[in-house]
Image (tube, rainbow, N blue to C red):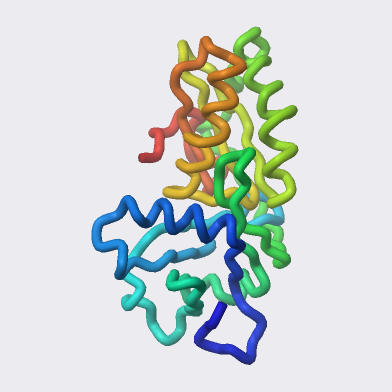
Amino acid sequence: MTENDPDSVPVLNVTDAALAKVLELRAEEADQEVLGLWVEVKGASGDAYTYDIYFRVADEATPDDWTGVQNGLTVVVSTDSVSKMVGSVLDYDALAGGLSIRNPNLAPPPAPAQASPAMTGPPPDLSGDVAQRVIQVLDRQINPSIAGHGGRADLVAVEDDAAYLRLSGGCAGCGMAAVTLSQGIEVAIKESVPEIVTIIDVTDHAAGTNPYYEAAKK
């Protein structure tokens, strides 16, 4: 990869597998030729950062953003995220079906969380047969795979034929989290637990401020 500061340690390298997947996704976008892959730190889960990964016009990068070019794909790391991502690697896990970031930098310890009225009630009951089988799929198939990238998926609740999941750690967030869900986690759960028809991502990186059932991200 060539970057705007060739004498420094690259902020973000993209593996061949991830590059192929990103180019496949970009091919579905309008004006794909002008789009770059933008990455920024969105928050943290424990000592691992969480990310936004999305397509945006590459020429909109500022001199303070880090940019790199790999096989015609421009990668941009936003200014505020550069120092948090030096030496990171964007990879694609075919088994889990998602993009993930391996980052050698740890997030600082979070400030002590204050109790939220929305979270003071009893948690959803996960003792039922369907919920336990979903948890088994996550524990045996999904999490061992994405743990190598600092990622994790947890069952938040089961309601009717829907499973509510929360992603954390190094898994890609937002737009790319949809890839992890639809191509990896969702397929594995539906195959093993046919009672589940819908998988809903309720990832909330501002932990403790929202109720259990947030709106699904599009």
Task: Kindly identify the residue that appears in the image at 64 percent across and 87 percent down.
Answer: 8
Task: Kindly identify the residue that appears in the image at 39 percent across and 68 percent down.
Answer: 36
Residue 121 seen in the figure: no
The picture places residue 19, in percent across and down from the top left corner, at: 52, 60
Task: Kindly identify the residue that appears in the image at 56 percent across and 57 percent down.
Answer: 18
Q: Looking at the image, which residue sits at the far left?
A: 30
Q: Quadrant of the C terminus?
A: top left
Which residue is more in the foreground, 35 or 131? 35
The picture places residue 80, in percent across and down from the top left corner, at: 51, 73
Check the image and report above or below for 206 versus 109: above
The picture places residue 128, in percent across and down from the top left corner, at: 64, 9
Check the image and report above or below for 173 versus 190: below
Residue 172 seen in the figure: yes
The quadrant in which residue 44 appears is bottom right
Q: Quadrant of the N terminus?
A: bottom right
The picture places residue 187, in percent across and down from the top left corner, at: 53, 27
Count every numbered label the image shows and give the total: 0
The quadrant in which residue 102 appears is bottom right
Task: Kindly identify the residue that appears in the image at 52 percent across and 10 percent down.
Answer: 195
Q: Would residue 171 appear left or right of 46 to someone viewing this image?
A: left
Q: Looking at the image, which residue sits at the far bottom?
A: 7
Which residue is more in the foreground, 27 or 64? 27
Which residue is more in the foreground, 115 or 200? 200
Check the image and report above or below for 107 versus 182: below
